[in-house]
Amino acid sequence: MTSKKWTVIISAYLTVLGLVVFTFFHFGIYRYFHILESYPNRELLSIWKGYVITISSGVFTSAFVTLLVAESDYLYGRRRALENIYYASEDLQRVFGKIKYIFPDEPIELVSNLLGEIDGNARSEEYNLHFKEQLKNFNDPDGAKKLYDECHMPITHDAQNKFKEYIWEHTEEKIKKDYNDPQMKKDYLDSVCKKKIEQYSEQLDNAMKSYVMFNEVRTKELGSTYSELNFIFANKSIRQDIYNKLYRKQVEQINMIKQTNFHFNLYFEGKGGNRAVMLDFVWKLQESLTSEDENAYYRQYMYEVDNEMVQVLVYANGKANESEFQDKKRYLITTKPGWMERMMQVQSEE
């Protein structure tokens, strides 16, 4: 791209120079500036004049032909370089389109605390079981019991109770009436809580696996295609616009995911982390990738990148169909609880 650009520039300069020199001597314009009037040898002057006219006309002709060919080659190369940026971004978008998300019906803090408590209790139970086995070797049963009571790891249910309270507060009144008996209420909440835990655990696992796929993603092609951009006009502004809104945006987002994958890899290898910590990492990534309104969640990152990709095609072809710019509604991930009721209420008010 750079060589094509400079071929056009140099050819243009030589074309103009050859035309100016040829015109200057062929039409005797130099006489108006009283140039060469004092030269004594008119015959030699005439020879040199003819020589300069011949050379300048040749330079003009060859440079002009080269300019025509180089311009066509440059415009083709310019379009191809911009299209390559588009295609490289499109390949990366396919990977982003495979990301799995987790959007609990309850506040994320409650879900995180619940999963953390469950994992913490599991470790505590394992520790306590091992501790009991060790205490069996004590000759003093009372002393062993006292030591266990003082040193065992406590099992807590505070987060689970708060989670159940939230569920009950947001349960429909009709269901509350059906489970008004304390034992029925407990069984109902236990069942709902168990299903929620299984659901969110599976979604969290799938989300982490979808991010781990980015371990194999490379941005070299995007970087090489960006480095090829070199335009004759508005080079700085176009390159800067593509760099800020497309190239850097994608590279930084991918690097952010890869850095977080360090923790996901350790988790899947069983070397560290619990689900509460992993959920916090996943949620942070989601905040950089998604947006929300009252009724739904959207793939905000993909929406923005896709529209910038269309802008690249505008640079390449000079225009774009308005329908090529994306509508954010097409990037819907999932709706929020109660969205249907809110929509029906809005329609009834209209």
Image: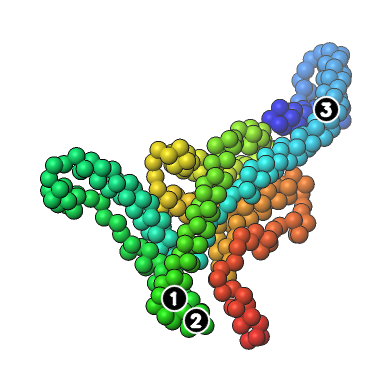
Q: Secondary structure at mark 3?
A: helix
Residue that lies at the very extreme toward the bottom in this rendered image: 349
Q: Please state which of residues 96 and 278 is positioned toward the viewer in this rendering.
A: 278
Q: Which residue is mark 1?
A: 184
Q: In this rendering, is residue 327 above or below 86?
A: below
Earlier residue among tags 3 and 1: 3
Q: Which residue is mark 2?
A: 178
Q: Is residue 51 visible?
A: yes
Q: Residue at x 79, y 15 (%)?
A: 40
Q: Secondary structure at mark 2?
A: helix
Q: Are marks 2 and 1 in contact (CB under 8 Å)?
A: yes
Image-based side of 232 in relation to 236, left or right = right
Q: In this rendering, is residue 57 above or below 87?
A: above
Q: In this rendering, is residue 136 above or below 119?
A: above
Q: Which residue is mark 3?
A: 66
Q: Are marks 3 and 1 in contact (CB under 8 Å)?
A: no
As measured in the structure, the alpha-carbon distance from the residue carrying label 3 to the one carrying label 1 is 88 Å
Give residue 346's mark: none
